[in-house]
């Protein structure tokens, strides 16, 4: 390892003295002007991680749903999953080392991890459409090369596409081809097979309005559509040609504001969805004939997908354990419906993809979704094998065969590495087509409890500590008791507070029997937080 080269190069990516940033829930995120040195150093770290795992590592330059002025970076581990937690603290240490401490920080990681310096390092890099992403991803590449690593620059890709590439590469192509073309082919072929099970779809049923959040998702959706042979008719709004990234549009805007994004012209009943800025989240919605807005968030998506999978497993006669993983933000009605009507196991974890992903791995079929629309389905190796075998079994009857083949296509349409707006969209569209279900019918599966999210600015959000998957506060003393008292005064109510992992705020969530009650409860709880 050529530390002299690193020292020389690092001067070109200087760290502003005194600046401290943390590797948070989804990597580093901040105004883009603070990130050049972080990018260079994450390039260095990825080389070490690659040597340690003897695998290709991914680096994605994006700040997802944050404003265009922000940017961020996260590392992708060998199977396409989030960076291992122990390495998050190395990332923070390396990011905050002053210029003259950089080499000793690198040495510390090498020693602690017992890294063998000889294996070749390989790093895949991707970026979103932010104006700062080009130079920041160049800084990442500079870091990779300074420490002698090999890189492959995928350029503009969605976050889930980069995760997919890393997984394909490290499984020697078993998961698919590590190219954007390979990604489209795999997903679109599976989609086409799935909708082959839907009878006589009309053009109306094939039509979907997509809000691309003025980001990478719009670009990549347009590319993907050309592989679908008109199996889907998409009108793309907010495709980046006019509006600003994530500004009054995108999945986060729609979910939090509970309204239609700007820049989209739709008629009552039109099926719509929104991606976020890096296309790893999706929410659906429509406006009814009374002009009332209806949101189908991650919880409704999880319900649709898990119902579909459970029915197929029964039809296939496969005894596999299916579960749904949610967070504290899951609407109480969704949890109630899943547990008591569908009889599936429900788990609740802390916020953040890595926590949900981890919990979902414990089941044969683990469906995980955050209410904000980030989610996917994980199939255990054993489950995949059983489904594969059954799909090839010539002795079973037609109904079982059809179910097994559909399960097989479902596995292929899903990006199991991480939540993926493009992949989730194809799966949802296929399920609606196969079930002959309208968006209104899907919405009526259960009725959301009215809810409200607020953020509270406090001097130090870290004084709030939570337990029970963030559903209860253990500190400061008395806060949880105060929340409990407030909740008691409303019907069907629930509320919790947690420090944000991505912003300097405390988040407040409340739900209750009416919107007025949910709003009032959220307000009262936020006063208790001060
Ligand atoms: C990040 C997480 C997302 C989570 C959100 C919560 C990943 C890839 N993304 O965007 O899953 O919902 O943070 O933000 O893990 P908060 O802590 O500010 O509420
Ligand atoms: Zn995102």
Image (cartoon, rainbow, N blue to C red):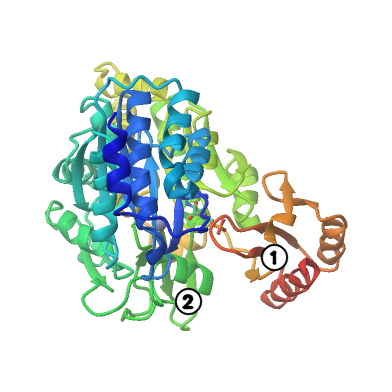
Identify the residue at image location x=28%, y=24%. Answer: 391
Compare residues 308 and 100 and report the one nearer the observer: 100
61, above or below 264, in the image: above
- Neighbour class for label 1 at 10 Å: few (<14), some, many (≥20)? many
Q: Is residue 159 left or right of residue 360?
A: left
Numbered badge on residue 378: none
- Neighbour class for label 2 at 10 Å: few (<14), some, many (≥20)? some
Distance, label 2 to label 1, CA atoms, is 18 Å
Q: Is residue 65 left or right of residue 234?
A: right
Compare residues 276 and 140 and report the one nearer the observer: 140
171, above or below 275, in the image: above
Q: Quadrant of residue 14?
A: bottom left
Q: Give percent across and percent down for residue 485.
A: 87, 63
Q: Which element carries disc 2, helix, strand or loop?
A: loop
Identify the residue at image location x=73%, y=50%. Answer: 465
Compare residues 444 and 528 and report the one nearer the observer: 528
Look at mark 2 in the image and give the residue it sits on: 259
Q: Quadrant of residue 263?
A: bottom left
Identify the residue at image location x=17%, y=35%. Answer: 177
Note whether residue 196 is visible.
yes
């Amino acid at each position: 390892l050529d530390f002299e080269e690193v020292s020389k190069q690092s001067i070109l990516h200087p760290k502003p003295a005194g600046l401290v940033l943390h590797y948070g829930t989804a990597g580093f995120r901040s105004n883009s002007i603070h990130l050049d040195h972080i990018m260079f150093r994450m390039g260095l770290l990825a080389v070490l991680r690659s040597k340690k795992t003897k695998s290709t590592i991914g680096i994605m330059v994006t700040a997802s749903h944050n404003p265009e002025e922000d940017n961020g970076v996260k590392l992708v581990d060998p199977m396409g999953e989030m960076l291992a937690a122990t390495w998050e603290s190395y990332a923070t240490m390396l990011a905050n080392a002053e210029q003259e401490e950089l080499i000793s920080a690198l040495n510390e990681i090498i020693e602690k991890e017992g890294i063998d310096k000889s294996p070749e390092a390989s790093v895949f890099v991707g970026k979103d459409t932010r104006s700062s992403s080009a130079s920041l991803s160049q800084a990442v590449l500079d870091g990779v090369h300074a420490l002698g690593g090999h890189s492959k620059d995928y350029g503009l890709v969605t976050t889930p596409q980069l995760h997919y590439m890393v997984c394909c590469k490290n499984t020697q192509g078993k998961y698919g081809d590590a190219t954007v073309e390979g990604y489209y082919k795999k997903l679109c072929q599976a989609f086409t097979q799935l909708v082959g099970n839907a009878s006589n779809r009309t053009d109306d049923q094939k039509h979907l309005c997509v809000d691309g959040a003025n980001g990478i998702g719009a670009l990549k959706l347009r590319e993907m559509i050309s592989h679908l042979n008109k199996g889907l008719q998409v009108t793309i709004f907010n495709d980046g040609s006019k509006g600003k990234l994530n500004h009054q549009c995108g999945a986060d805007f729609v979910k939090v504001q509970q309204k239609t994004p700007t820049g989209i012209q739709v008629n009552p009943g039109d099926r719509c969805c929104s991606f976020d800025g890096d296309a790893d989240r999706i929410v659906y919605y429509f406006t009814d004939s009374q002009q009332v807005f209806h949101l189908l968030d991650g919880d409704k998506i999880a319900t649709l997908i898990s119902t579909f999978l459970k029915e197929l497993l029964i039809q296939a006669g496969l005894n596999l354990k299916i579960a749904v993983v949610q967070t504290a933000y899951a609407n109480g009605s969704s949890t109630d419906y899943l547990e008591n009507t569908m009889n599936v196991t429900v788990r609740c974890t802390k916020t953040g993809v890595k926590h949900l992903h981890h919990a979902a791995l414990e089941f044969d079929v683990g469906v995980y979704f955050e209410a904000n629309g980030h989610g996917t389905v994980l199939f255990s190796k054993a489950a995949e094998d059983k489904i594969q075998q059954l799909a090839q079994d010539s002795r079973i009857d037609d109904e079982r065969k059809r179910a097994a083949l559909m399960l097989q296509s479902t596995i292929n349409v899903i990006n199991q590495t991480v939540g993926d707006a493009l992949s989730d969209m194809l799966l949802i569209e296929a399920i609606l087509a196969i079930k002959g279900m309208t968006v209104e019918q899907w919405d009526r599966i259960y009725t959301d409890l009215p809810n409200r999210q607020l953020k509270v600015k406090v001097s130090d959000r870290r004084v709030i500590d939570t337990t029970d998957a963030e559903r209860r506060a253990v500190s400061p003393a008395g806060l949880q008791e105060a929340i409990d008292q407030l909740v008691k005064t409303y019907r069907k109510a629930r509320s919790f507070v947690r420090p944000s992992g991505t912003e300097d705020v405390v988040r407040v969530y409340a739900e209750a029997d009416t919107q007025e009650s949910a709003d009032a409860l959220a307000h009262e709880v936020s006063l208790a937080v001060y």
